[in-house]
Amino acid sequence: MTTPQQEQLRRFRFPILFVAMVAVLSATRGINVLAGFNPLVALVAGLLTSAAAIAAYVWLNRRVEGREAVEVARDAMWKGLRNGILLGFALFLTTILLIGVFGGWESMRWNSFGAFLVTMGAMMSVAVNEELLFRGVVFRILEERAGSLIAVVASSAFFGATHLVNENATLWGALAIGLAGGTLTTAGYMLTRSLWLPIGLHFAWNFTELGVFGNATSGTEGGDTGLLHLALDTSRTVLTGGVFGPEASLIAMLVCTVPAILMLRRARRTGQFRTRTR
């Protein structure tokens, strides 16, 4: 039996959880920036802030909603992360190779293994925090209130819009992030009803883009952030995504949309599309 206080918290669960997880995301991002002075420290900080964010999410769900956060259950963790990482790596590698095939590469050089480790730690934390916020809070609660279809469209649009605050942000880039990245990770969540696959996918895409190839990511400068520095022809915006990065390229849109549609179709066939419940 719930208490009046618990009922009150649950009534305002969306703003409470949203504000709390934004605060967690901001705090963990600050910690990772401070830890960037040393590659090993940055890597450990990424792991610890990721674990702390998940612990905060689980606690908030118990305290505010009176529920167990089954979407981050440990029994699905390794399989979900493995599948997500493999898919994210394959999708970005396909994207960047196709950009090269069509003449979008300018030059490539080795950069720094230390930068590779720093970016790995930071991208772990970014993937965990953003998936907890956008799929674990925004999409999940919106789906309960409005159904799966509206929740997919609205949460993906919101996810894309939040990237407009990034340096070198463009309206097309934000739209591309929402349509491709937001829909893709949401489809992964709907299919598995777990956040582990979206977390792994989000991490692998961002890390391969920024930490391996040193490309700009969502409008954030690349360059000295990865093992390599692959310079793209930013004047060919449709092909390379311009200053926003490969995520805003037409190729990335196509490469990410195909698996997103396939996962959404499978989710519908397996009964994972939901109608409004409250």
Image (cartoon, rainbow, N blue to C red):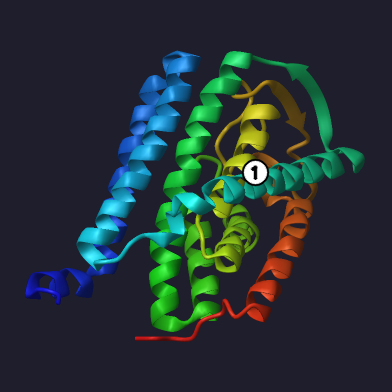
- Please, is residue 78 above or below residue 118 in the view? below
Most foreground residue, 112 or 264: 264
Q: Which residue is mark 1?
A: 85
> x, y percentage for residue 136?
42, 60
Q: Please identify the quarter of the rendering in which residue 141 is found.
A: bottom left
Q: Quadrant of the N terminus?
A: bottom left
Rendered residue at 67%/50% (across/down): 248
Q: Position of residue 138 (x, y in %)?
A: 41, 65
> Depth check: 10 or 2 in front?
2
Q: Quadrant of the C terminus?
A: bottom left
Viewed as shown, does residue 57 lie left or right of 197? Answer: left
Residue depicted at x 54% and y 27%: 119
* Quadrant of the rendered image containing residue 116: top right
Q: Is residue 110 above or below residue 3?
A: above
Give percent across and percent down for residue 183.
Answer: 60, 64
Query: Disc 1 marks which amino acid?
Result: Ile
